[in-house]
Amino acid sequence: MTDNAIEISGLKKTYAATGRSPGKEALKGVDLNIPRGSIFGLLGPNGAGKSTLINILAGLVVKSAGSVKIWGFDQDTNPRQSRASIGIMPQEPHLDPFFTPAGSLDVQAGLYGVPKSQRRTAEILDLIGLTDKADAYSRSLSGGMRRRLLLGKALVHSPQILVLDEPTAGVDIALRNMLWQNVRKLNDEGMTVILTTHYLEEAEAMCDDIAIINHGEVVARDSTSNLIGHLDRKTLVITPDGPAELPELPPEIAGKKHHNGMLSFTYQSATTPADAVLHILREAGITIKDVKTQEAHLEDVFLSLTSAK
Ligand code: ADP
Ligand code: MG
């Protein structure tokens, strides 16, 4: 047994050419291990190959080459156990309009062979906030309720790993918050969570570790803090109390005077404390009216990694 929830090696996917579209090499040899117990982010722009990877994990897309182990079970040699270990909330919602939420969960549990006595329909309805809609027709549910039902369906067989493909793309803030709370709760209870997103902020807020995927390749893989620490740039933006010139600065601090009179100072936070900047300002006789800090975001990491390609 390993400590990895997922082990992917040499994974390739080429979609065959059809009358409408040319062939597409969506994954070009992905190696990726995802540790157990983490919230793991698969981050990348539209078309990067995120859904292809997720759909291979889900058994919905057949890989062209490589191997996939889910919870230690090889997908090719142990298809049943590997499938039982993972629950997927797909990006595209497909719901049967004639089932009620309670009915959908029950059918899904049946598909996974969960015995009636072990079904957790009421508990899952409560988790996803659909208890009072348990017996409403799915076609009468709002978009947000459908998304929540999809999450519920991914949980019926109590998988060790939950995968959410762009769970919050195009959803409102209330639903996003609810999904995030659910994900954190499930992770606290021990579930490994993998989510794909093209929102850098989301990966930054939610994930312990992140892989960045672009054009079918993993271009970076690290802890969220390391990926951000990688940049380790902080900027202090000062509004002086009256006109002020940029003071003389040591080489590790880059200064700039803006048209509106504001001064900004950029430095590496690991080696330079903010107080060093404030000290220089005091020495130069500059009184501070207001001060703001700006930190590097994953957006910057992403740009620096992908623009180099
Ligand atoms: P993401 O989820 O990161 O947006 P996808 O995995 O959906 O990316 O798509 C990766 C690439 O594969 C894209 O260029 C997309 O157009 C292509 N692709 C996805 N699904 C199919 C398919 N069924 N047939 C042909 N090409 C596809
Ligand atoms: Mg996708």
Image (cartoon, helix red, strand yellow):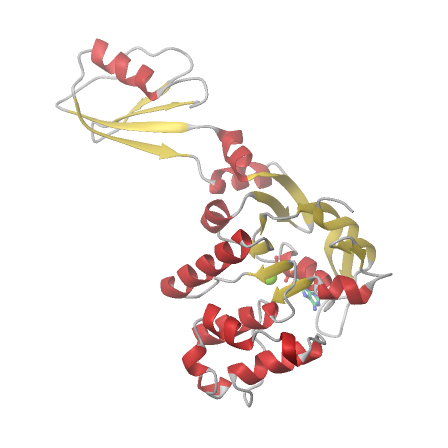
User: In the picture shown, does residue 93 fall above or below 185?
Assistant: below
Residue shown at 49% from the left, 56% from the top: 185
Q: Position of residue 283 (x, y in %)?
A: 22, 9
Q: Is residue 15 visible?
A: no
Picture quadrant of residue 65: bottom right
6 or 16: which is nearer to us? 6
Residue shown at 64% from the left, 61% from the top: 51
Q: Is residue 92 visible?
A: yes
On screen, residue 263 versus residue 37, left or right, reads left
Picture quadrant of residue 221: top right
Residue shown at 45% from the left, 17% from the top: 271
Which residue of the protein is positioned furthest toward the left in this rendering? 242
Quarter, ligand 1: bottom right
Badge count: 0
User: In the picture shown, does residue 242 fall above or below 154?
Assistant: above
Which residue of the protein is positioned furthest toward the right in this rendering? 77
Q: Position of residue 273 (x, y in %)?
A: 37, 19
On screen, residue 213 versus residue 260, left or right, reads right
On screen, residue 222 versus residue 147, left or right, reads right
Q: Position of residue 81 (x, y in %)?
A: 78, 64
Q: Position of residue 223 (x, y in %)?
A: 57, 38
199 or 246: which is nearer to us? 199
User: In the picture shown, does residue 248 fall above or below 53?
Assistant: above
108 or 9: which is nearer to us? 108
Q: Quadrant of the C terminus?
A: top right
Which residue of the protein is positioned furthest toward the front in this rendering? 117
